[in-house]
Amino acid sequence: MKKYITEFIGTFFLVFTIGCTVIAGGTGVIPPLAIGAALMVMIYAGGHVSGGHYNPAVTLAVFLRGRCATADVIPYMISQSAGAILAALVVRYLKIGVTVKAFVPPVLPAMLVEFLFTFALCYVVLNVATSKATAGNSFYGLAIGMTVMTGAFAVGDISGGAFNPAVALGISILGISHWANIWIYLLANFAAGVVAAVVFQMINPPLQVTPIATDEPPYETPV
């Protein structure tokens, strides 16, 4: 249960930060920096407990890599979605009366950039947080948070920069994105998680893949 609570809390603060900075009209460097920092600190806070996924696409990638128990996959995704929903509702309460203009992404470009940067995110997670070659490193949270920050800077104006199905759910509830667009994020994000896991397995020796018991964190726990 502690793993699921950790995933809930981390995803809550990620989506809460997104909602507050974007709905407040933040422009330029502020939202990407705040979002990347929020993800980074939540990963450092919860990585030793749950692995700090806070993203259903990352959970899928880590599962396919062999570092997340089958029994944890659905509970992780439910916890992440619940955190995103509650965060969106809290932001809506705090920002009541604020007019939100829904972002309308171009379908194919948005799908492409969501796939690319979700792939980058999952690929970074697998390499810095699940590989024995980088076990015990101190940079895993920074690397993951900065990947999201980079994606937000690079393609946020094209797709909205979700890179996360739970975030897609949150921004849909907030009205930042139309519900009709959510399939773009779900398809691109989950597909990227699968491809990232396949590429990781191709690049890394098979001996690095060691399934874990259900009571262990899904990542190599940094010391």
Image (cartoon, grey):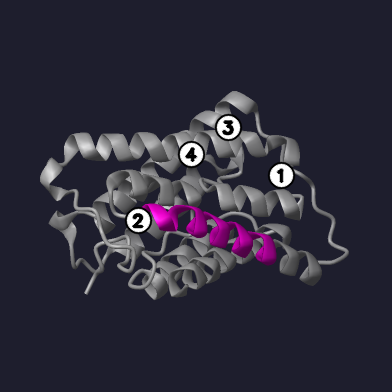
Q: Give the spatial CA distance, label 3 vs label 2.
A: 32 Å
From the viewer's side, name the closer residue of 215 and 93: 215
Q: Give the spatial CA distance, label 4 vs label 2.
A: 18 Å
Magenta stretch: includes residue 71: yes
Residue 69's disc is 2
**Image quarter of residue 40:** bottom left
Name the image quarter holding the C terminus. bottom left
The kind of residue tagged 3 is: Ala
Mark 4 burial class by Cα count in 10 Å: few <14, some 14-19, many 20+: many
Examine the rendered structure and indicate whether residue 158 appears above or below residue 77. above
Q: Is residue 168 visible?
A: yes
Q: Give the spatial CA distance, label 3 vs label 4.
A: 14 Å
Mark 1 burial class by Cα count in 10 Å: few <14, some 14-19, many 20+: many
Q: Give the spatial CA distance, label 1 vs label 3.
A: 12 Å
Horizontal and vertical percent for residue 198?
A: 29, 35
Q: Give the spatial CA distance, label 1 vs label 2.
A: 33 Å
Q: Is residue 114 visible?
A: no
Which badge, 3 or 4, is on the more N-terminal residue? 3
Examine the rendered structure and indicate whether residue 40 appears above or below residue 176. below
The kind of residue tagged 2 is: Ala
Cβ atoms at labels 3 and 4 below 8 Å apart: no
Locate residue 34 relative to residue 213 in the image: left or right.
Answer: right
Residue at 24%, 53% in the rendered image: 211
From the viewer's side, name the closer residue of 130 and 68: 68
- State the residue position of label 4: 190
Q: Give the spatial CA distance, label 4 vs label 1.
A: 18 Å
